[in-house]
Image (cartoon, grey):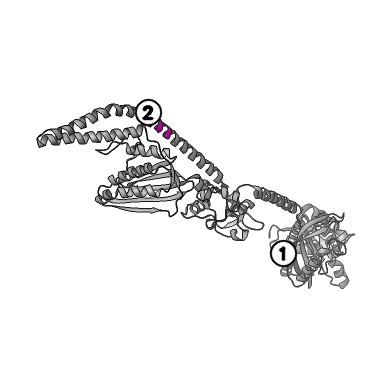
Amino acid sequence: MAKHKILIVEDEGIFASDLQNMLNNLGFKNSFVAHSGEKALYKVEKIQPDLVLVDIVLKGEINGIDVAHEIKNRFNIPVIYITAYSDENTLQKAKITEPYGYLLKPFGEKELNIAIEIALYKFKMEKKLIESETKLKTIFEFAPDGIYLNDLKGNFIDGNKSVEKIIGYKRKELIGKNFIELKILPSEYKQKSQENLMHNAKGEPTGPDEFILIRKDGSKVPVEITTHPVEINNNIIVIGIARDITERKQAEDELRKEKRFTENIIATVPDSLLVIDKNLKIKSANRTFYETFQMEPKKVIGASITNILGDEDGRLSTELTRLFGTEDMLENFELHYQSKKMGSSREAQRLTSKGERIFNITARGIIIAEEEEEEEEEELVVLRDITERKNSEEELKNAYTKLEDTQKELIQSETLAALGGFASGVAHEIRNPLANISASAQYCINKFDLARKIKNYLRIIIRNSNKANRIIKDLLDFARPRELVFKKGNIVQPLNKACDLTKAKRLNYNIRLYKRCSRVLPKILMDEKRMEQVFLNIIINSIDSMSKGGRLSITAYPEYEYVVINISDTGKGISEQDISKIFNPFFTKKSDGVGLGLSVTHKLIQSHKGKIEVESKYNKGTKFTIKLPIYQEEKKSN
């Protein structure tokens, strides 16, 4: 209170002094006195009081009302009138200056204090109100969005600078005018505008709605408008906010162009592309995917990727789920897809030998946000068809294996030929002495009366001579095989003969025979007697490997260009280090064997332009697979 400065404008000195004393008693220590209007204006300018007490009637050229008028206009300081007159005419003149109170002489300290407190408080509140109004007006005037007011008929009441900027009209050109009459709104938006005014009349806000406005120069501007009805003096006024969305529209157009461009690129990418959500549901797919998998979008969108592609071992779903929330990338994941629809013959040719399509899968997390939607984490899955590459790799591998086999066969044939020549020479030199030894021993047994023990030794000589002679015969057969006599026939015939010839030995070893041959087998060109020898050699080897009993299985069936014969046993098998040697001459694990049986077998099958393969697991058994080419006329008829 002590800080407030109060100026007393009073031409009666005694009253002015009494009034100053009252102010001092009330705590207003900073008070000043001016005895005329001229002095009052001088002191106001000099001391800048917080309140002025002015007598309405002052002596001189400037009266109290004139002083109050100047103080209000020039200094904006609150004024309280002091008067002994209360006539209506004087009061009406005083009202024009908008005083903050009246004090009628005589008055006491209480009345004075109340008048001062009310005046100071009222001035303070008015000042705050003015500041607030100024602030609001500044915000209104310089807001980036266009803010306007109109009535429920669409007549313009007021607007800010941004409204002028948006539509190109000055405010004075708009006030009192109707938007439709000014042709600011195109005809196609009139109905929407009238519907919004009807909502405003009910007290309901509208928007945001997009409109196209026609500027004064005829150009068009896209805007987004929201409206809010407010009631002022029992009338509804509509506050509208218009936002120029030209840049946004341009950005949206650019985004749409980029999106179309991206979609066109994605559509023409040769790889299949999928976008999946966190539940592994497919959200979108490109054209290549639909063409490759021959599916309709309605069966793909919303379906689980694992249901579409298959995921029996669960590895695909595990890997894709793992990627969410990370920056990791799935690479080189190989998927074997069982194609149910092969489509054209060209598509069928692209399948593997197992009827599969092979895809290399790459995937990583992406962030996608649709318009007016929150960002959502998804995954882009790329499927590259590598079936043809895999087929080429398999063909190359098979060709390389075939080349290796051919090289091995060539080396073996050359080795066998060399060994055959050597065996032929050795056999020729040994055969005659053996014959003499055997004949001499037989002569001694028949001619002389010898002791039994001596005769037994002579019989051992004869028996071993005969065995050596058989070995020599095998060597000669190996070195100079008899000429084969090829005739059309059914492979089952020599196979059955071999089984019959080994029956006694099978029964003796407690071996069960399981034989299954196709009812109609294509004929082959063969030397039946030599093929019987082939089967005998293999079956005897199988029986010898099952000295404690077991099972001998024989099957025969056509496959592509061959008749295939499988002979398998449950014997002791062949070790890994020995399996590559079994067709070598003189290789044997039998204590009484020579090691020529399988060598001769291999050579005979080659002579029939066939193939022989062996698979074995030690202590589990061995399987021989023989492939003999089908007779050409049989292939044509089939």
Magenta-colored stretch includes residue 419: yes
Q: Which residue is mark 2?
A: 418
Tell me, yes or no, whether the highlighted magenta stretch contains residue 73: no
Q: Quadrant of residue 129?
A: bottom right
Image coordinates of residue 283 in percent, x first then y, are 60, 57
Query: Is there a contact, CB below 8 Å, between mark 2 and mark 1?
Result: no
Closer to viewer: mark 2 or mark 1: 2
Q: Give the residues in magenta.
A: 408-421
Quadrant hosting residue 444? top left
Which residue is rendered at x = 87% and y = 73% of the image?
A: 88
Indicate left or right for 453 with 494 as reference: left
Q: Amino acid at mark 1?
A: Tyr
Mark 1: give few (<14), some (14-19) or many (20+) Cα within 10 Å: few
Left/right of residue 601 with respect to residue 223 in the rendered view: left
For the residue pair 622 and 287, the one nearer the viewer reads as 622
Magenta stretch: dominant SS? helix
Secondary structure state at the residue bearing disc 1: helix
Disc on the earlier residue, 2 or 1: 1
Residue labelled with disc 1: 121
In depth, the one of 543 and 535 nearer the eye is 535
